[in-house]
Amino acid sequence: MEKRQIGQSGVYASVIALGCWPMGGDYWGGTDDDESIRTIHKSLELGVTFLDTAPAYGRGHSEEVVGKGLAGRRQDVVISTKASGAGLSEEAIRDKLQKSLARLQTDYVDVYFVHWPSRTEPMAGTMEALEKLRSEGLIRAIGVSNFSPEMISMASKYGTVDIVQPPYNLIWRFIEEDVLPYVAEKGIGVSTYSSLAQGLLTGTIDLRTGYRPTAMRPRSVLWKPENFAKCLYMVEKLRAVAQDLGVTLAQLALRWVISQKGITTALVGARTVDEITENAGATAFELSDENLAKIQDISDEVYDSMPYYYDMWENWSSWQKRGPQREV
């Protein structure tokens, strides 16, 4: 399993990362803690040593499961978690981190993300607090999630941003227009989330798929009526490419992500041994220039037809937009 440096931090992450939100047991369906722990152990066996969680995932339950799964193995992994929810002052961040450390059964985390930018609290105080935590050895690298280039630039005035965590996959490629060029110039790492488009790029979802009222997927803009059918059409075309290569659709989609310039690691959720085994298989083959061009053409058909969305969940769309839609 290849490892890549997170920015200039000296922390190295496996190119496939284990996303532990599904282990929290909320939004993505039920979960089995014992199977989640087996999944963590299998990920280490396969070389997937970067694990990402957050206190917002199952109200801390995901962190607790990760802590149990890594008992006696802390030195083998890179752990990232997040400052979630309202309150990004120094006092609030320090309190959030201490609670996360207790649940994770560790005395430091390798990467600490600001989960979403604050609408109200000054970035200066947040970044200065994170740098204090770094100087105390409680965190090793600083990350920001769901930040625009303007927000990353503002944060960088008050500390070092080592890595960003935006949504990115074959359907959702908006960061190619602004975030990726910016962070490449600044030497900042990228950990993609929704690398399989919340499961759309596994090929297991269709128009008949049903969801609980609390399910997370239908909240995504990819499930909007004007987008969903187009996404499924694209999935079928990609499935044919995967079959020709003798790999699964998920492996094809993940291989594409980690083949893109500037990507450090592709974060992908898993809660079973079979899922993490399949995901790790994305590193077992290469995509030729011809294959990459074919995949790009298929992706472009959908991507070029989508209007610009400020973020995948529309958490910010009513608060701030980036001006007019891009021309296609």
Image: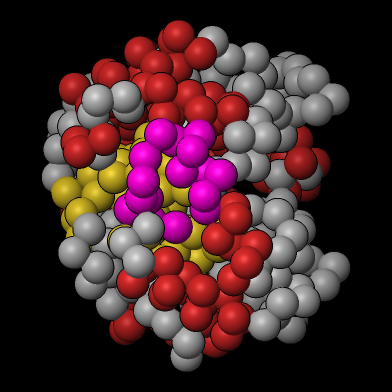
Where residue 306 appears, as percent x and y from the top left, is 66, 59
Where residue 277 appears, as percent x and y from the top left, is 29, 20
Horizontal relation, residue 142 to residue 205: left or right: left
Work out whether 162 lies above or below 111. Answer: below
Where residue 257 appears, as percent x and y from the top left, is 35, 49
- Along the line of sight, the residue nearer the viewer: 189 or 108: 108
Horizontal relation, residue 314 to residue 200: left or right: right
Horizontal relation, residue 63 to residue 6: left or right: right
Residue pictured at 85% horizontal, 68% vertical:
318
Work out whether 128 lies above or below 88. Answer: below
Indicate the colouring scheme.
secondary structure
User: Which quadrant is home to the C terminus?
Assistant: bottom right
Residue pictured at 76% horizontal, 41% vertical:
219
Task: Report the magenta residues as a range.
Answer: 97-112
Res. 293 image quadrant: bottom left
- Along the line of sight, the residue nearer the viewer: 46 or 120: 120
Q: Residue 110 colored magenta?
A: yes
Say how many tags the image has: 0
Residue pictured at 59% horizontal, 71% vertical:
90
User: Which quadrant is home to the N terminus?
Assistant: top left
